[in-house]
Image (cartoon, rainbow, N blue to C red):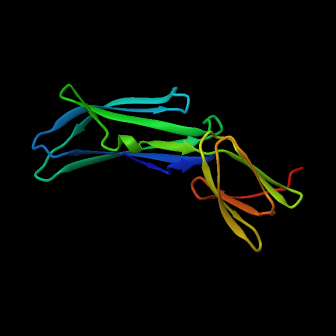
Amino acid sequence: MSIYPKRISSEENLIIHLRFSNKSKKIQKLKYVLSILNPNNKQIYFKEDNLILGSNSDEYIKELYYSFFIDDTYIPGKYNVIFYLILNGKKIESVTKDNDFFIVEKLTYYSLNNKTIIINNSYMKTKVKLYGKEKEEEINIEGNQRKIINHKYDYIEFANNKVDKINKRR
């Protein structure tokens, strides 16, 4: 399985790519299960489906893509994606299961009195890049922390290389 992007923010699309292969000389009937657990370990998506994998003299491959629009209902944090097959009564786990996750990042940011204020609304550390007229900087913000930077930056980059304008606080 592959998941893109691994770090994402609201108003973006997430893609989960599943790849099935059959090295057998015979047709394989299987069931697959795809599930997503939010940072509170609550299941927010579940799909169970049957699949038939053809065969030929070479390896037979079938690919499926699932797209999810990440909106404001996705809370910040790490989402675990669980995928496995049931073939001939045996459960076969994803070979990439240790990397089957994505992270929803949520930041609040603004400028005030020639300073830039960034609040990490997630419990996970987030890396950001800041861009100004004469200066750029890359920093890490610990989870649920506020960072005050003694320079007014114009743009912030985070998550899936999302670039956003930093506005003045009103």
Left or right of residue 147, residue 95 in this image: left
Q: Position of residue 105 (x, y in %)?
A: 61, 45
Does residue 38 lie above or below 153 as drawn? above
Residue at 51 percent across and 46 percent down: it is 14
Residue at 44 percent across and 29 percent down: it is 46
Residue 163: quadrant of the picture: bottom right
Q: Which is more toward the observer, 74 or 76?
A: 76
Residue at 30 percent across and 43 percent down: it is 95
Left or right of residue 140, residue 28 in this image: left
Residue 20: quadrant of the picture: top left
Q: Position of residue 107 (x, y in %)?
A: 69, 47
Q: Position of residue 11 (x, y in %)?
A: 63, 46
Q: Which is more toward the observer, 143 or 163?
A: 143
Question: Quick one: which residue is furthest to the bottom in this view?
Answer: 134
Residue at 50 percent across and 44 percent down: it is 102
Instruction: Tell how many labels.
Output: 0
Q: Which of the image's four quarters has the N terminus? A: top left
Does residue 49 lie above or below 132 as drawn? above
